[in-house]
Image (cartoon, coloured by chain):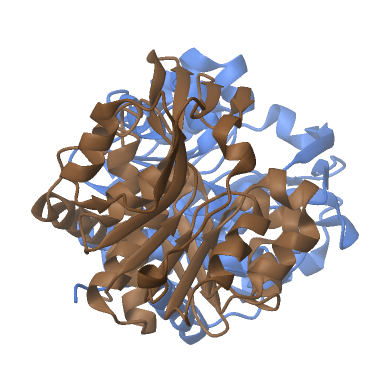
Chain colours: A blue, B brown
Amino acid sequence: MSLLIVGSVALDTVETPFGRVQDALGGSAVYISVCASYFTAPVRLVGVVGGDFAKEHISFLESRHVDLDVLQTVEGGKTFRWGGKYHYDLNVRDTLFTSLNVFEKFDPKIPEAYRVSGYVCLGNIDPTLQLQVLGQLNKPRLVVGDTMNYWIETKPNELFKTMKHMDVLIINDSEARLLTQEPNLIKAAKQIIGMGPQAVIIKKGEHGAMLVTSDTIFSAPAFPLENIFDPTGAGDSFAGGFIGWLARTEDLSPDNLKRAVIYGSTLASFCVEKFSVDGLRDLSYLKIHDRFRSFMELSRFDEK
Amino acid sequence: MSLLIVGSVALDTVETPFGRVQDALGGSAVYISVCASYFTAPVRLVGVVGGDFAKEHISFLESRHVDLDVLQTVEGGKTFRWGGKYHYDLNVRDTLFTSLNVFEKFDPKIPEAYRVSGYVCLGNIDPTLQLQVLGQLNKPRLVVGDTMNYWIETKPNELFKTMKHMDVLIINDSEARLLTQEPNLIKAAKQIIGMGPQAVIIKKGEHGAMLVTSDTIFSAPAFPLENIFDPTGAGDSFAGGFIGWLARTEDLSPDNLKRAVIYGSTLASFCVEKFSVDGLRDLSYLKIHDRFRSFMELSRFDEK
């Protein structure tokens, strides 16, 4: 079923103990779209870039069959840029700079033809923009949203308003604690369910992810990687794999949500193995399914 | 099969955001023995207490069928005491005091009759004492050992020597990183396997535990508890459930090691629900098995 993705399209400058890239393709909408494109079509990306956005990035997204009809280009403007540095243990990162550029005046418009989108993923951007997109859509079947500490701290009321329209919120553990002021993650998740979403996924980095609904808790492991080169985009890749699988299967049962969490974890694991989107360029459904099966091996046990 | 446990017997003074206990029953050998006692018999506790060790503690251990024949009592001596304080998020604790008392001159002696012990668990004590116990035993079938940052920092060589005789090392994530100087836990686990043990279990607190052997990785979730009152003894309870199950089943296959990890996680989850050993007093095999099944529910998923 058709999938609409809104979020940032960025040029990232990232330094990790294993290397550095400058102006590499990034942004939440890019990671989500590329990951979802392995599962379903059409995947429509709503975003904005400047005149400096390289043709090769457009070509790559097109090669992944991402529909760019609603990607705005501001000629003469500069693309959103983010710079960050990861430390030795990769769990800590410093944001070195954020230049909103064309994103500052981004006014997402959804053409009439795209307003019927069954599945919608709101990447991590200003909750006001997320809501503005939702307001233009015609009863989506599933709305998955992401956010971050910056919005929780600076626009809590806007975020609470947008959350009321989300079916699934994807958030990391420290953000869940910040949002609810509750250190226990199970209690935090239940509080979030009281705020609108019917399900919440708490991402815990190297410790996996947890899906909580009013009557289920599902704990997914992280894939045991010995070499993590660049954690940038892991959370967005998770969201892309998650909603991609749901849009493909059109099945929102608890069992299928669990599978979607594992597909999300699978895409996140491929993402962090290389810089930028490089770990996501040459995947195949078969390769993805193989790793899904490795996740099964990793967590399966039985009774004697 | 018979199980020999060596470790501390302590009186703990613990403060958490939810309350405080003074001189409560604790110590690694106590938690391990009580937990293992739900699976197998005989469970023999090797340790030392002072004349101040209350009769009620002895009675409780006896009610759990823990064999105390090798528990030394130093009349006129004081029992080992530990004091700690947990902070709001329960992941951080401060040691307020450690009074070794009778433990300072502890010289574990294993009587002839107990030297044939199939299963052995070395609780977290000085690695020299651990080795001294092992040296008196007659070819145990399985040696499981625990340690902590204090021994890694102060007696690394003694620890390395003792580790050569362990089949399974149980250690937490920060200790694994400290022991190997390797931030990546998978790489750290593989390094540890090169040091002697054939398997290593890395405990990650609220994030579960990971079993690594030369050819398997198994990731176990933590039980999602909304109310954790006192984390003291969780790691020892894990060890007790783990080795208790193995001693009961006498099956060291990879599949059974995974079950043992889940039984360990199960006992740890009961432990933290109350202060001291209170969460472990009134369990039953049925209650334990029920929670084992909840762990299955928690982590199980299938292919479409």
Say above or below: B4 vs B212.
above
Q: Is residue B181 above or below residue A284?
A: above
Q: Is residue B113 something that shows in the picture? A: yes
For residue A295, above or below residue A234: below
Front-most of residues A97 and B93: B93
Residue B119: x and y in percent read 38, 72
Query: Where in the figure is residue A93, as x and y percent of width and height?
Result: 77, 41
Q: Position of residue B295 (x, y in %)?
A: 26, 56
Apparent side of residue A213 relative to residue A69 in the rendered image (left or right)? left
Q: Residue at x 47, y 42 (%)?
A: B48
Residue with the most extreme left position: B286
**Residue beneath the point at 45% across and 62% down:** B121
What quarter of the picture does the N terminus of chain B occupy? bottom left
- Give the quarter of the image for residue B233: top left
Looking at the image, which is closer to me, B77 or B187? B77
- Quarter where residue B303 is shown: bottom left
Report x, y in % for residue A215.
17, 41
In front: A293, or B146? B146
Tally of numbered tags = 0
Left or right? Give the position of B181 relative to A287: right
Judge from the rendering whether residue B82 lies leftward or rightward of residue A209; answer left or right.
Answer: right
Residue at figure coordinates x 74%, y 57% from the top left: B179
**Which sits in the foreground, B99 or A58?**
B99
Which quadrant would the C terminus of chain B be assigned to in this image? bottom left
Can the viewer see residue B301?
no
